[in-house]
Amino acid sequence: MARVYVGIGSNIEPERHIRAGLATLRQRFGSLTVSTTYANPAVGFVGDDFLNLVAGFDTELPIHVVAAELRDIEAAHRQRGDGSKFTPRALDLDLLLYDELVLRADGIQVPRDEITRYAFVLRPLAEVAGNRRHPLLGITFAELWAAFDQSRELLRPVILS
């Protein structure tokens, strides 16, 4: 059984799309561990604020199947209309971790570089997987968050209505 962590984000009707995305993840993968949801400014383009969180689940599915399922869920929400990375998103699902696997192939990258780059990824991941170790760095996500320059990005906790 593999432990998987997924970054979830949206800035197009974000509450609706995140709720729907979480419901679909539960249908496909079962019980979820879900972090706090955080609002933060768009990164890389001018746009509405994003809501971001991290969900974790256990699965026996191979990583390629999990990645395909996440792409299917995104497609159902018509995210990334023009295919570029820095655009508004109805639902963005990023496979952050698949157990301790390190993989850079077939369009899959785990662990994701964004984990150590962005507060909106690292902070919620540290909440739900703080004692787990980064597969490449060997230190826990809680330690990574404690050392992170938190002045670089503004995160506001949000309660989904």
Image (cartoon, rainbow, N blue to C red):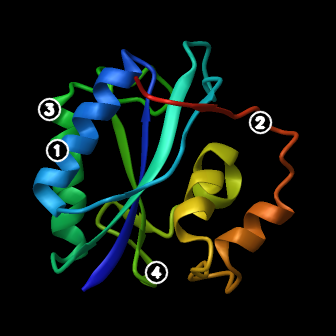
Crowd rating for badge 2 (residues with CA inside 10 Å; few <14, some 14–19, many 20+): few
> Which amino acid type corresponds to the residue marked 3 in the rendered image?
Ala
Q: Residue 93, how many percent across, how many down?
A: 35, 45
- Label 3 vs label 1: CA separation? 10 Å
Give the mark nearer the N terminus: 1 vs 4: 1
Q: Are marks 3 and 1 in contact (CB under 8 Å)?
A: yes
Residue 29, how many percent across, how many down?
Answer: 17, 62
State yes or no: discs 2 and 4 in contact (Cβ < 8 Å).
no
Between the residue at mark 1 and the residue at mark 2, the CA separation in whole angstroms equals: 29 Å
* Secondary structure found at label 2: loop
Badge 3 or badge 2: first in the primary sequence: 3
Q: Identify the mark nearer the N-term, 4 or 3.
A: 3
Q: Earlier in the sequence, mark 2 or mark 4?
A: 4
Discs 1/2, front = 1
Position of 149 with respect to 134 (left or right) is right
Residues tagged 1 and 4 counted as in contact (Cβ below 8 A): no
Residue picked out by circle 1: 24
Circle 4 residues within 10 Å: few <14, some 14–19, many ≥20: some
Residue 122 location in percent, x, y? 63, 56
As shown in the figure, which amino acid type bears the numbered disc 2? Answer: Glu
Residue 141 visible in the snapshot: yes
Which residue occupies the foreground of this view, 106 or 12? 12
The residue under label 2 is 153
On the rendered structure, is 154 left or right of 94?
A: right
> How many marks do you count on the picture?
4
Left or right, 145 with reference to 72: right
Q: Secondary structure at mark 3?
A: helix
Q: For mark 1, give the secondary structure.
A: helix
Residue 92 drawn at (x, y percent): 37, 38
Question: Which residue is the site of mark 3?
Answer: 76
Question: Which label sits on residue 102?
Answer: 4
User: Considering the image in quadrants, where does the C terminus appear?
Assistant: top left
